[in-house]
Image: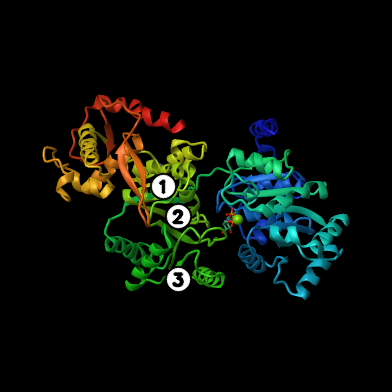
């Protein structure tokens, strides 16, 4: 089995580029452009849409990896109008299907779905369309569950194929068939027989998230070892990425959100992500009290309530939905102008996916992350596995680094190709280009380690709060060391220093459990040389000694230790 996957992996890597597929000399090329402009009212194809469409119309199996909002739907909806036979679309959620049907109806395209609430008439209409020569139905949407459990449907599908009416099979969110992916759905396994059952019918798999291992899995599960893999760049040029400091006081947070929603985002639509159900409800309540038209959405609402909230938001009856990550798959409002993370997401994938719901229409939109260290520590302490822990740590660099392009950090995480010019001032760092100095924070580290030892001699472990108090010479007397100097920076900056020391591995996070919750303690890091000089790049005065320019030249080396560790 291992050999098999290595073989597939080699095949993926050796794929020729897709340039032959962006030709405009196919027999359908003229018709494509006409349909694009007249039916879909789009000016031109986006990067990779045309390649994927030409490939699937040439009966190639295709796996298309394109970021959320990239325009995957067009890649099967348009070809469905070229041969005017039936395109079967497998889609994971009924609500997602319903949204698509509404959109298609507005474009005057014949589409339908079958599910357990379909009426007899609807079923009859669809079944006869599948087998009739004169049928007008172009797109039929079903869930993988329907494929798995409806024998009647499969019989009709077989007939449809036998008569030569089955044009193509589309599998949306195709990563759901891999146990490696984050949305594994066992029913997707049933789709593996399509290839042998309907030979010659091209399969088109679509997804926004697929690492190499997921791709190999998809190829094996769906018997698509010869599929053409088309990848669109993951950069979303119209999204502006920004991190702001989150105040520790709740009403200060509400002030920030209120100001944004009433001024900058007045009459615009957005999402505010929070990390727990309680936080989500509180935040929504707080914003309502300030006269804002928002609604909360989380997993504990029943499906009817969820549907209503989603619909009202789509109709702009709410300015924003205050949501947990339950507000996710199937959310595709084109004009979302802002996505605000009120708490740090649980992973880089989370950040990318959730903020990616902004700007699907290609217009400029903002992705704002409100960062403070205690939210980060809470995520790490609540992680229930090593992987989850690693994921929640992966985002610290994105939040703390004060000089690198935010996009470059995202691209590095997803192993996407990256050019310095790809950002084009569309993140706070590239736009404002603050001057960075290097500060010698060695004494800060030593003071912190001193306080940790002092506490541990009294058999006390330091939470962030306790550490901060002791460091600033307040709070419990027994935890303070009067010999140490109070830091000259602000508390916010002090938290940044602690975060930096955690990121670099000079400090560690230790998880503890109380009766009701998990707690994060700050501990000494394991792997680093005590005598090392610790230099921290920062955009404003930290109150520590600035390091001479010569070290700036040497900054590459300064970042060595963390790079090395990340690979372990
Ligand atoms: P995905 O499924 O990849 O997340 P969608 O298919 O939902 O993305 O499309 C996202 C948005 O992009 C939609 O609002 C769609 O109308 C728009 N879109 C798709 N293709 C084009 C195009 N060629 N030109 C302009 N807008 C497009
Ligand atoms: Mg989609
Ligand atoms: Zn940038």
Q: Is residue 318 above or below residue 481?
A: below
Q: Is residue 135 left or right of residue 431?
A: right
**Does the residue tagged 3 have its C-beta within 8 Å of any atom of ligand 1?**
no
Mark 2–mark 3 distance (CA, rounded to whole Å): 20 Å
Mark 3–mark 1 distance (CA, rounded to whole Å): 27 Å
Residue 486 numbered mark, or none: none
Residue at mark 3: 318
Picture quadrant where residue 547 is located? top left
Q: Are marks 3 and 1 in contact (CB under 8 Å)?
A: no
The x, y position of residue 90, in whole percent, is: 69, 57
Q: Residue at x 70, y 72 (%)?
A: 117
Residue 426 numbered mark, or none: 1
> Tag 3, which secondary structure?
loop
Q: Residue at x 48, y 47 (%)?
A: 237
> Tag 2, which secondary structure?
loop
Nearest the viewer among 557 and 31 is: 557
**Does the residue tagged 1 have its C-beta within 8 Å of any atom of ligand 3?**
yes
Q: Are marks 2 and 1 in contact (CB under 8 Å)?
A: yes
Q: Quadrant of ligand 1?
A: bottom right
User: Colour mode?
Assistant: rainbow
Q: Residue at x 28, y 55 (%)?
A: 247
Residue 364 numbered mark, or none: 2
Q: Residue at x 78, y 67 (%)?
A: 126
Nearest the viewer among 296 and 464 is: 464
Of callouts 2 and 1, the N-terminal one? 2
Nearest the viewer among 90 and 57 is: 90
Picture quadrant where residue 561 is located? top left
Mark 1 surroundings within 10 Å by alpha-carbon count, few (fewer than 14), some (14 through 19), many (20 or more) = many
């Amino acid at each position: 089995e291992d050999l098999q996957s290595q073989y597939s992996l080699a095949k993926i890597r050796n794929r020729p580029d897709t340039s032959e597929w962006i030709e405009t000399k196919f027999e359908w090329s003229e018709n494509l452009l006409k349909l694009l402009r007249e039916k879909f009212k789009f000016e031109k194809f986006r990067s990779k849409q045309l390649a994927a469409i030409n490939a699937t119309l040439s009966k190639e199996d295709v796996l298309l990896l394109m970021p959320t909002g990239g325009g995957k739907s067009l890649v099967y909806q348009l070809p469905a109008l070229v041969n005017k036979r039936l395109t079967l679309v497998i889609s994971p959620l009924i609500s997602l299907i319903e949204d698509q049907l509404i959109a298609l109806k507005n474009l005057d395209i014949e589409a339908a779905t079958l599910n357990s609430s379909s009426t007899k008439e609807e079923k009859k209409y669809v079944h006869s369309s599948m087998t009739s020569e004169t049928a007008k139905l172009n797109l039929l949407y079903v869930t993988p569950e329907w494929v798995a459990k409806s024998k009647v449907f499969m019989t009709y599908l077989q007939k449809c194929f036998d008569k030569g009416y089955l044009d193509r099979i589309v599998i949306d969110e195709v990563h759901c068939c891999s146990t490696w992916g984050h949305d594994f759905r066992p029913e997707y396994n049933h789709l593996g027989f399509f290839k042998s059952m309907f030979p010659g019918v091209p399969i088109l798999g679509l997804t926004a998230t697929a690492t190499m291992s997921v791709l190999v899995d998809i190829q094996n599960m769906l018997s698509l070892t010869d599929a053409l893999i088309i990848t669109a760049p993951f950069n979303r040029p119209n999204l502006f990425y920004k991190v702001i400091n989150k105040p520790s006081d709740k009403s200060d947070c509400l002030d920030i959100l209120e100001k944004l929603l009433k001024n900058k985002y007045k009459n615009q639509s957005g999402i505010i992500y929070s990390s727990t159900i309680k936080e989500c409800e509180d935040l929504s309540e707080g914003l309502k009290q300030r006269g804002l038209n928002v609604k909360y959405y989380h997993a504990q609402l029943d499906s009817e309530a969820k549907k209503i909230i989603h619909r009202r938001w789509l109709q702009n009856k709410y300015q924003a939905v205050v949501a947990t990550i339950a507000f996710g798959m199937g959310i595709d409002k084109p004009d979302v102008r802002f996505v605000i993370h009120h708490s740090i997401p649980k992973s880089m994938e989370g950040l990318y996916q959730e903020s990616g719901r902004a700007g699907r229409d290609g217009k400029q939109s903002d992705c704002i992350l409100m960062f403070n260290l205690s939210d980060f520590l809470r995520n790490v302490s609540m992680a229930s596995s090593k992987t989850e822990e690693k994921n929640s740590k992966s985002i610290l660099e994105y939040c703390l680094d004060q000089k690198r392009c935010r996009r470059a950090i995202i691209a590095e995480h997803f192993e996407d190709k990256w050019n310095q010019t790809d950002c084009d001032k569309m993140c706070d760092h590239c736009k404002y280009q603050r001057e960075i100095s290097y500060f010698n924070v060695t004494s800060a580290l030593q003071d912190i380690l001193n306080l940790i030892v002092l506490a541990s001699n009294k058999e006390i472990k330091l939470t962030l709060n306790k550490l901060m108090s002791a460091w600033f010479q307040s709070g419990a007397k027994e935890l303070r060391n009067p010999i140490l100097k109070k830091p000259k920076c602000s508390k916010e900056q002090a938290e940044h220093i602690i975060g930096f020391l955690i990121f670099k591995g000079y400090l560690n996070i230790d998880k503890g459990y109380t009766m009701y919750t998990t707690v994060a303690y700050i501990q000494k890091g394991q792997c680093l040389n005590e005598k090392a000089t610790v230099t921290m790049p920062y955009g404003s005065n930290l109150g520590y000694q600035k390091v001479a320019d010569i070290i700036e030249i040497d900054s590459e080396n300064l970042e060595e230790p963390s790079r090395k560790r990340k690979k372990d």
